[in-house]
Image (tube, grey):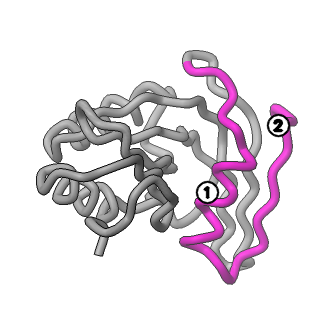
Amino acid sequence: MLSTVCGRLVGSLRVPGAFTKATVAMTEALAKIADVEIDPDGTFKYILVRVKVKDGDVHKDIVRGTKSAEYHNHIFEKVSPAMEALGMECKCLGGGKIEHKSQEKKLRVFGESTAFGKADHSVSVVKLKTAYSDYEITWSDDKK
């Protein structure tokens, strides 16, 4: 159980020091948030977001992307209130684009966000590999 862990990595969560019951509950709520939510096909904007328990140190990074977003901040404007409703706070770590070819089982991460800067695509790819383990996933710092 999480309450027995002190100061180490649990799954994809950074867990510091001693816990209170509230912290354990929030940590478990954080663990239930999907690492990745992206559109099933196409090329679209994405953001890398750090989600953190309010007034705590426990956090995880998540990837969100969709074709419906004209700008990267449109994604964040949906993610942030949803996380706040769960008792979390979040910060956008940057953005880029994802090219998703589901028929070929390929994902390509590239580009940057004008508003948030370039996400660390290597971190995003690690997250994507958890959700798409049978895919070929590549990334580059190219803008196209």
Position of 116 relative to 100 (above/below): above
Check residue 13 for magenta coloring.
no
- SS at badge 1: strand
Q: What residue is disc 2 on?
A: 144
Q: Position of residue 125 (x, y in %)?
A: 69, 56
Image quarter hosting the N terminus: bottom left
> Between disc 1 and disc 2, whose residue precedes?
1
Residue at (55% x, 42% y) in the render? 46
Q: Position of 94 compared to 26: left or right? A: right
Q: What residue is disc 1 on?
A: 42
Residue at (58% x, 71% y) in the render? 130
Quadrant of residue 95 within the rendered picture = top right
Check residue 128 for magenta coloring.
yes
Residue 17 or 83: which is nearer the viewer? 17
- Type of amino acid at the residue the image marks with label 2: Lys
Q: Position of residue 51 (x, y in %)?
A: 38, 41
Outermost residue toward the top in this view: 115
- Type of amino acid at the residue the image marks with label 1: Gly
Residue at (24% x, 34% y) in the render? 54
Quadrant of residue 138 within the rendered picture = bottom right
Position of 85 relative to 108 (above/below): above
Residue at (66% x, 42% y) in the render? 97
Q: Position of residue 68 (x, y in %)?
A: 43, 42
User: How many labels, in total?
Assistant: 2
Q: Which mark is residue 10?
A: none
Q: Which residues are magenta?
A: 116-144
Position of 81 relative to 117 (above/below): below
